[in-house]
Amino acid sequence: MTDSLCILAFTPVPARARCDGWSCAVQRGFVEGLAAGMTPGAAARSVGMGRQGAYALRRRPGAESFAAAWDAAAAFAARQRAARRTPAPVRPRLPTGPAAEAIGCAGRAAVFAARSDDEARSALGTMLDALYGPKADSLPPPAPVSPPPGREPCELSAAALSLSRAGG
C-alpha cells in the first residue's frame, strides 16, 4: 500500500446522520485535502465544513483513528513539499589561513584567492586602506603642538624617545 492509501485507512468518527454533518465521505475528503497539502481550514472548506468543526471532531471521543490519519496526512504533505523543494546551491569553499588573500570586495562579501603570505598581507592592507582609510604608519607625522601659555615645552632626550617608541 502506498503512503496516500495508508493515510485513508482510518476509522471515521461515529457521528449522527445529518445531511450537513461530518459523514464518512466528508471525513475522508478532509483527510485527502490535508494529504494534498491544504491547511486544516482549507481542507475543511473544500468539503463544505469549517476549521473549528474539524478540530472539534478531532477532540471527540472515538476520534483517535481520525486524529492519527490527520497527523499522517499532514506529515505526508510535508514530505511531498520537501521532496519538491530544490536544494540550495553549494557554495565553493574558500581558502582559509594566512595564505588566503582578499583580492576584491563587493559590499560585505570579499573574494579570496590563495597567494603567498607577503602578497596576502599587502593585498589585505590595500583593501583595508580602501575601506577604512590609510594606516597610521603611512600618515604624515602630526604637526607639532605648542604648549599652552604659561608652560614650558618638555624636552626629551634621544634615548627617552627611542624607549617610548619601542614600547618600553
Image (cartoon, rainbow, N blue to C red):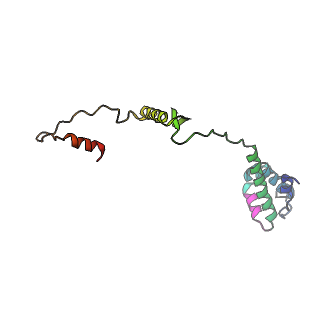
Q: Residue 126 location in percent, x, y?
A: 44, 32
33 vs 116, nearest the viewer: 116
6 vs 132, nearest the viewer: 132
User: What residue appears at the point 28 percent right and 42 percent down from the top-left corner?
Assistant: 165
**Does the magenta segment cover residue 57?**
yes
Q: Residue 107 location in percent, x, y?
A: 51, 34
Q: Main secondary structure of the magenta part?
A: helix
Locate residue 123 relative to residue 38 in the image: left or right: left
Using the image, determine if residue 69 lies above or below residue 83.
Answer: below
84 vs 25, nearest the viewer: 84
30 vs 142, nearest the viewer: 142
Task: Examine the rendering and report whether any part of residue 63 can be seen.
Answer: no
Using the image, determine if residue 126 lies above or below residue 19.
Answer: above
Locate residue 127 relative to residue 60 in the image: left or right: left
**Does the magenta segment cover residue 167?**
no
- The residue most toward the front is 159
User: What residue appears at the point 82 percent right and 58 percent down from the top-left corner?
Assistant: 22
Q: Residue 150 location in percent, x, y?
A: 10, 41
User: What residue appears at the point 89 percent right and 54 percent down from the top-left corner?
Assistant: 1
Q: Residue 48 location in percent, x, y?
A: 79, 51
- The residue most toward the right is 1
- The residue most toward the left is 150
Q: Which residues are magenta?
A: 52-61
Task: Examine the rendering and report whether any part of residue 140 can be seen.
Answer: yes
